[in-house]
Amino acid sequence: ALCVWQLRRQARQRREYLQRRAQEEQLRRQEEKKQKLRQALDENRLLPTELRREALALQKELELDTPGLDGTGSQDDEYRWAGLEPPRVMVTTSREPSSRLRLFAKELCLLLPGARRMNRGRAELGALVGACQAAGVSDLLVVHETRGSPDGLLLCHLPHGPTAHFTLSGVVLRQEVGGLGGGSPAAPHLLLLHLDSPLGRRVGTILKHLFPVPRPDSRRVVTFANQDDVILVRNHVYKRRGRTVELEEVGPRFQLRPYLIRLGTLEQGDAADVEWRWHPYTATAPKRRLLSTT
């Protein structure tokens, strides 16, 4: 059990984290207003209605801004120290997993270099997250299933979040892919394709920091390709033969679709603030592309 002073320290760090996130969001909104004002002045058109009351104050701030700097640098980026140390990833499953789910969790550990798998047992989420925080784990992955088919992935970045919720589909195991049996344990090069919207960059940041920095001579490539807001995940190894390159898929192969990002850890549940939520039932939902600008 945690001591009282440890609980107080965690609560204080959590409050500081949320305060810095709120300040960062306020600065981002202020920069968006200045950008709209600058664009309206450059194009010599009417100011947006929501900016007319504070246009003079924004113009004074624009005159003081340094050219080339937007002033929106992250004050509290959860991944600002990424790359100094390799991530420590823990993979677990829902309770009473099927054999296919256990095998898929094992193959996730092969996909993520240095990841370890933990049997869920009867552990609750609070005890699970607390044990990972005490062990210095950087990310916790929880895989869920429905009738023996993996269909959900929860990705919790420790110690303060965020927690990303994904639907999981199209799971093909390594033995079903039919490529190389063992593959390569080296850290892979990452390809993030068509994740160029603000939300896409946020999801890409969450996913890419599960992997350590690769060596230049690594012969493994993991691809996260966005296609109609569905992220296709592929794992390949390649060999050079003269001027040609032979590419072979080793698996596992699956698809991810984000539907919720919370500014908190997994055990906080609905108490954590919602950073983004997918609204599929709005009138414009079929027309929008969330993860890419095109």
Image: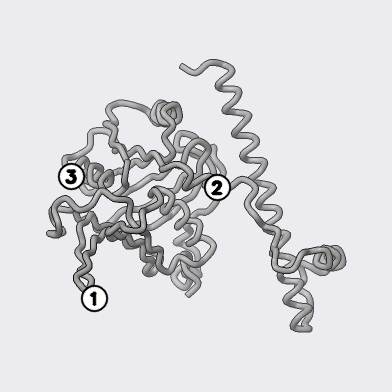
Q: Position of residue 250 (x, y in %)?
A: 20, 57
Q: Judge left or right: residue 286 versus residue 114.
A: right
Residue at the image position 22 percent from the left and 49 percent from the top: 149
Crowding at dot 2, Cα within 10 Å, few <14 / some 14-19 / many 20+, comes out as few
Q: Position of residue 92 (x, y in %)?
A: 31, 37
Q: Are marks 1 and 3 in contact (CB under 8 Å)?
A: no
Residue at the image position 44 percent from the left and 26 percent from the top: 134
Labelled disc at residue 243? 1
Q: Which residue is mark 2?
A: 80
Q: Which residue is mark 3?
A: 100
Crowding at dot 1, Cα within 10 Å, few <14 / some 14-19 / many 20+, comes out as few
Dot 2: element:
loop
Residue at the image position 18 percent from the left and 44 percent from the top: 100
The CA span between labels 1 and 3 is 40 Å
Q: Position of residue 34 (x, y in %)?
A: 75, 66
The CA span between labels 1 and 2 is 38 Å
The disc labelled 3 sits on which kind of residue?
A: Arg
